[in-house]
Image: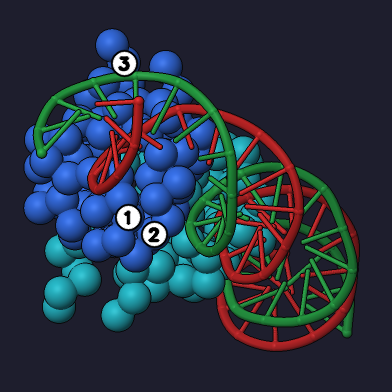
Chain colours: A cyan, B blue, C green, D red
Amino acid sequence: MSIEVIFGQQLRKIREERKLSQEELAFRSKLDRTYISLLERGKRRPTLNTIFALTAQLDIAPSELVRMVEKNLDI
Amino acid sequence: MSIEVIFGQQLRKIREERKLSQEELAFRSKLDRTYISLLERGKRRPTLNTIFALTAQLDIAPSELVRMVEKNLDI
DNA sequence: ATGGTCTACGGACTATAGTCCTCGACCGAG
DNA sequence: CTCGGTCGAGGACTATAGTCCGTAGACCAT
């Protein structure tokens, strides 16, 4: 599976655990609502800064999210 | 300090520890030499995929590089 | 049936990641 | 001095990240 698809899956998982809507996450991280949707569906490749912006609102370290991607990549 | 500047510093540090030139790293990670230079000087913001491509050639986990950025960010 | 919430998805756009080509400066070795 | 290896920098470009508009469908309650 590609990096961006795995990333999207993990992002969605964390967001849902936090009980946030895509729109709410977008608002808090100052990103666009439709862009969160694109990310979760693996249609976009976030920059490092975007990852930091997202994780800051999800109460998780950027490196932790990346680590989740790594782990799920080789499955 | 900004995320991209810290990232560049850490990238350079690791690359030099591995005794690779920018050109050699660029070749191995299938990126452009001038782009590695831009990254190290904090002039560009790498995508997640680019981080994976770089770290794969630096014998370090992507999450580890990101963790280094995190740690140095609040100094 | 209707209104609210959530999400997928599209098109058109702007900003910027990443490429390619080039030149100039530096440095240590021959 | 010159030459090879290395890097900074800039200009012009192409690809794609990220925005901003919208529509439509699913689900849930009233």
Disc 2 from disc 1: Cα separation = 5 Å
Q: State yes or no: discs 2 and 1 in contact (Cβ < 8 Å).
A: yes
Of the two numbered discs 1 and 3 in the rendering, the one whose residue sits closer to the viewer: 1
Residue A8 found in image quarter? bottom left
Identity of the amino acid at label 3?
Asp
Lateral position of residue A51 relative to residue C29, left or right:
right
Q: x%, y% of residue C29?
A: 9, 33
Residue occupying the point 19% across, 40% down: B15
Label located before the other in sequence (3 or 2): 2
Total labels drawn: 3
Identity of the amino acid at label 1?
Ala
Residue matched to label 1:
B26
Q: Secondary structure at mark 2?
A: loop
Chain letter behind tag 3: B
- Quadrant of image for the C terminus of chain A: bottom left
Residue matched to label 2:
B31
Label located before the other in sequence (2 or 1): 1
Badge 3 density bin: few <14, some 14–19, many ≥20, Cα 10 Å: few
Q: Secondary structure at mark 3?
A: loop
Residue occupying the point 32% across, 21% down: B73
- Is residue B75 placed above or below A24 in the rendered structure? above
Chain letter behind tag 1: B
